[in-house]
Image (tube, grey):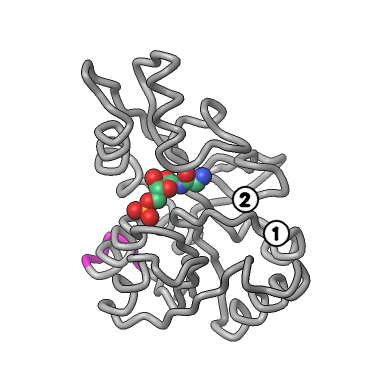
């Protein structure tokens, strides 16, 4: 049984999709042991509590320095027996030591088709604002492994979503979540939990 820690910062709809998928059996062989939030006011914490999952708040800003933050995160992850870290709307940059320690064991959901609209400064609603500004007809979401770069790690699953006339960033965000994010994040976790994902030459192969 794959032991997962989910990292969140906001509303937690992706966390909810994972909780629901474990409950319904869409994800097998996995459980969430811990949810860590970067903010104490994140609604995601309430979702975790309602599902009976342990929670912690570790805020980068409230740590003395970056090594204090690193130590607190690593300690919490280890104490929970974490085997896979899922970034589900997590808005803090991870310390390099954590990325090294959990190589190919950290995944992230990003609300665009990488390599479009990703990298530094592209997060949350901003991604959809930029997609609309550029006038793309297709956008979507990507689940990828996290490496030392920003949104540069091996891609696991992508799903395209159509942009429609009259879309606002909020409308587009909701469609991308419903049609792509809430499907491909649970799917990627299920594939990993069942040993179907390998990484070779920085590319993902699904069996
Ligand atoms: C999601 O759209 C997720 O893809 C995005 O933040 C939102 C969090 O929503 N993540 C990023 O932009 C990461 N670069 P949620 O808290 O409701 O899951």
Q: Are marks 1 and 2 in contact (CB under 8 Å)?
A: yes
Give the image location of residue 122, x and y in percent: 53, 36
Image position of 125 with respect to 84: above or below:
above
Q: Which residues are magenta?
A: 24-28
Secondary structure beneath dot 1 equals helix
Image position of 130 with respect to 36: above or below:
above
What's the mark number on residue 146?
Answer: 2
Would residue 103 be seen by someone viewing this image from the given angle? yes
Question: Does 192 appear in magenta?
Answer: no
Image position of 19 with respect to 201: above or below:
below
The local crowd at label 2, few if under 14, some if 14 to 19, many if 20 or more residues have their Cα within 10 Å, is many
Left or right placement of residue 205 versus residue 35 in this view: right
Image position of 37 with respect to 9: above or below:
below
The Cα–Cα distance between marks 1 and 2, rounded to whole angstroms, is 7 Å
Q: Main secondary structure of the magenta part?
A: loop
What's the mark number on residue 99?
Answer: 1
Q: Nearer the viewer, residue 83 or 19?
A: 19
């Amino acid at each position: 049984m794959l032991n997962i820690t989910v990292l969140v910062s906001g509303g937690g709809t992706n966390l909810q999709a994972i909780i629901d998928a474990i409950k319904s059996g869409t994800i097998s062989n996995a459980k969430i042991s811990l949810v860590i939030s970067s903010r104490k006011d994140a609604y995601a914490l309430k979702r975790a509590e309602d599902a009976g999952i342990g929670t912690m708040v570790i805020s980068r800003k409230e740590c003395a320095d970056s090594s204090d933050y690193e130590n607190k995160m690593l300690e919490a992850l280890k104490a929970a027996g974490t085997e896979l870290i899922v970034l589900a709307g997590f808005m803090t940059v991870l310390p390099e030591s954590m990325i090294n320690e959990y190589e190919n064991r950290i995944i992230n959901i990003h609300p665009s088709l990488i390599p479009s609209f990703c990298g530094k400064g592209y997060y949350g609603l901003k991604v959809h604002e930029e997609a609309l500004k550029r006038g793309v007809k297709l956008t979507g979401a990507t689940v990828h492994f996290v490496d030392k770069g920003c949104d540069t790690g091996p891609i696991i699953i992508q799903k395209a979503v159509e942009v429609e006339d009259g879309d606002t960033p909020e409308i587009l965000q909701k469609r991308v979540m419903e049609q792509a994010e809430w499907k491909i994040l649970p799917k990627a976790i299920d594939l990993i939990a069942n040993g179907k994902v390998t990484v070779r030459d920085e590319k993902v192969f699904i069996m």
